[in-house]
Amino acid sequence: MAIQSRRDQVLAYRFLLRRRHATLLSGDPDSPEAPLRKLSTATFASIMLATLMAAGAGVLGALSPGHSASWRDPNVVIVVKETGSRFIYDPTPAPQGSPPALHQILNYTSARLLLSSSGWKTVSVSEKSLADTPRAADIGIVGAPDDLPSTGNVRGGPWTVCSLPGANAQNQPVTLTRLTIGTSGDPTDGSPLGDQGLVVQAGGGYWLVWHGHRFQIGDPAAPQNGDTPARVLTFLGWSPGQALSVSQAWLDSLSALSPLRAPHLDNGTPPGTVSVTGQKVSVGQLVRIPAQNGVAERLFVVTVKGFVQIDNLQYQLLATSTDLKPMDGTPQDVGNGQSGDASTVSSGDGQWPQTPPQLVNASAAGPSTACATTAGTDGSMTVSVAPATTGQPTCYRLPPQAPSATYLADCIAVAPGTAAVVRSRTNTGIAAAEYLVSGNGEYTAKDSLGPDPATTLKALGYAAVTPIAVPQTMLDLLPDGPALTPDAARQAVVPPPPGPAPTSASGSKS
């Protein structure tokens, strides 16, 4: 027999041991399966399962930190799972030396103003986890929005205000004002006025709406033979019966320019060279030079310094305030007479139309809706008119407001889950205020962004949003909301005073 190697001896020894183990454990030394194989496999599987369970528990703990102390961070919004209440952790509450405490926060906006603009997070925590932490005063801004739309839902579209027929709570016919925020296009599909005009009536007065502005017609305080609203309307070829009734709030949304009134002329005697067809004339005499030889008709008024050429609108307005009958003259009359200073005859600061515009009122049949829409960054407005639709307007009715210096919109049309960041556009030279306009429609208001709008917008997550310019006259249609500033968000909420004691049916206090 060949000499065995060391390897052969080891294999033979291990073979002998396996046969002995098999004989002892199973009684069969020739069993093909190792007697401890199942036990080894089960032990290995158990160890791996335990390892996986431990890893899963670790991942769950990382994803659900409410079971740990991760909420003890002043840059976290703590939401109680069972109730939805929100808290802010304060490690150093007043008075100095007090233990860390929780402040219940009134709304989401207040919470965002108190957190760092980056790195903040929301953590859901059970009531049990917070049970041993002291409570400090409730804080926040009363009336601040509890819902902040995402940046993608901040609307930068135009604003439209409409005056339309409607009904009040008693189902009586009234004229309502509807404000539509951030929606492109006229919601009524009305026809823009263009160069045409619209005569409207509100509060007993009459106005011409032209090129997105309003001009008061006549002087309500003028004598009966002066430039009263009725006389001015008549001399301009219009009538009070044509006027479209609009709400005062809609009218106030348009910027007011110089009223259409008779220009003031200084009293005195014209120069000696001033005469018409050989007749001496007085100050205020209106003179018409008919068109001839290819030269268009020209209109003049006599002033203390001589003839001043005027346009058709000035001519008609001056006619309302003089008893002098207009005269026809010749080019020689004007050429021989002394010319006056045109600046002494008002032209409405150059903003009046030169001739009375054609009105859309004449073509309007039945009740109409008038709308004004922001048309750009230069303060311009586009006015349109459309036939009124039947039924109530589609918008949220605002609750009754306290007396205000301005008229508010009756209802707001705003897409759910949207907001607008706007800058007031005024011509006063005062630094423009910025606002966040949001809400659920029924309580839509403009919330001031405070003295540092950029910081506030960054805290609210709107750093990338560029405020759109909206006329202050339109912003005045919305009720004022609170100022949104970090300092205001830190203020403790003062509970309202207790109301009067309830009384019984007999009138005695219970």
Image: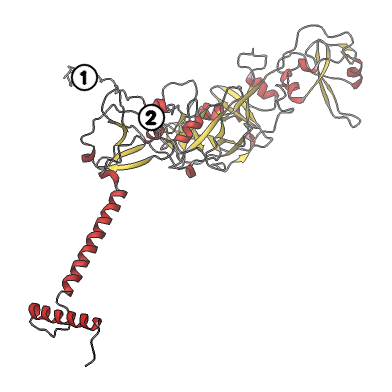
**Residue 470 locus on image (x, y percent):** 56, 32
Residue drawn at x 21%, y 63% as measured from the top left:
47
**Residue 456 locus on image (x, y percent):** 47, 31
**Residue 254 locus on image (x, y percent):** 59, 28
Question: Which quadrant of the view contains residue 226?
Answer: top right
Q: Which residue type carries mark 2?
A: Gly
Apparent side of residue 205 relative to residue 510 in the rendered image (left or right): right
**Residue 114 locus on image (x, y percent):** 39, 32
Q: Which residue type carries mark 1?
A: Ala
Apparent side of residue 193 relative to residue 114 in the rendered image (left or right): right
Q: Residues within 10 Å of mark 2 (few under 14, many from 20)?
A: some
Q: Residues within 10 Å of mark 1 (few under 14, many from 20)?
A: few
Judge by depth and name the residue closer to the eye, 456 or 438.
Answer: 456
The residue that label 1 is drawn on is 501
Residue 367 visible in the current orientation: no
**Which badge, 2 or 1, comes first in the chain's sequence?**
2
Quadrant location, the N terminus:
bottom left
- Helix, strand or loop under label 1: loop
- Helix, strand or loop under label 2: loop
Judge by depth and name the residue closer to the eye, 80 or 294.
Answer: 80
Residue drawn at x 92%, y 16% as measured from the top left:
336
Residue 37 visible in the current orientation: yes
Question: Which quadrant of the view contains residue 272?
Answer: top right
The residue that label 2 is drawn on is 143
Outermost residue to the bottom: 1
Residue drawn at x 67%, y 35% as measured from the top left:
196
Q: Tell which tag, 2 or 1, sits nearer the viewer.
A: 2
